[in-house]
Amino acid sequence: MLDREFFLGFVKIHILYHAAKEPIFGVEIAEELARHGYNISPGTLYPTLHRLEREGYLESSSKVVNGRVRKYYQATAKGRLVLEQSKQKIRELVTEVIEEK
Ligand SMILES: [Zn+2]
């Protein structure tokens, strides 16, 4: 099990990546994260989404689906910028840590 701090960093980048491609909702992102081997509880996921929104990386909109309100999250310009900066850092990390160059 990854240390919480490391785990959340990966999770946040993953959320930003998907939220930059299309609007996503909680259950969907939880399933996507699980597919990648991150088992995140709602008690961690939702506060993380709310924090990303409060900090201006995501914005949300509500949509009624099957009679229920579903909250969709999408990356803001600020979120997209951080994602691009993170990509640079990931590239650098892969070069050193994985490829040992
Ligand atoms: Zn993914």
Image (cartoon, rainbow, N blue to C red):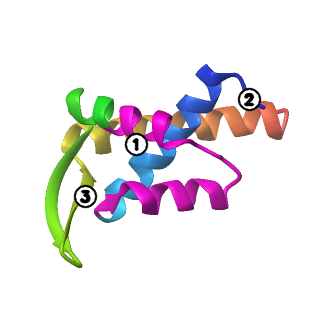
User: Would you say the beta carbon of the disc 3 residue lies within 8 angstroms of ligand 1?
Assistant: no
Residue type (three-letter) at the residue carrying disc 1: Glu
> Quick one: SS at disc 2?
loop
- Figure quadrant of the N terminus: top right
Dot 3 and dot 1 residues touching (CB under 8 Å): no
Region rendered in magenta: 23-49
Q: Is residue 93 magenta?
A: no
Q: Is residue 6 left or right of residue 63?
A: right
Look at discs 3 and 1 and give the one toward the viewer. Answer: 3
Say which residue label 3 marks: 72
Which image quarter: residue 20? bottom left
Q: What percent of the width, then of the height, locates residue 78?
A: 23, 37
Near-viewer residue (66 or 95): 66
- In the drawing, what numbered circle is on residue 84? 1
> Quick one: SS at disc 1?
helix
**Residue at (61, 41) in percent of width and height:** 91
Q: Is tag 3's residue or tag 1's residue first in the polypeptide sequence?
A: 3
User: Would you say the beta carbon of the disc 2 residue lies within 8 angstroms of ligand 1?
Assistant: no
Q: What percent of the width, then of the height, locates residue 52?
A: 31, 33
- In the drawing, what numbered circle is on residue 2? 2
Q: Is tag 2's residue or tag 1's residue first in the polypeptide sequence?
A: 2
Furthest toward the bottom, the residue is 66
Q: What percent of the width, then of the height, locates residue 90?
A: 60, 38
Residue type (three-letter) at the residue carrying disc 3: Tyr
Residue type (three-letter) at the residue carrying disc 2: Leu
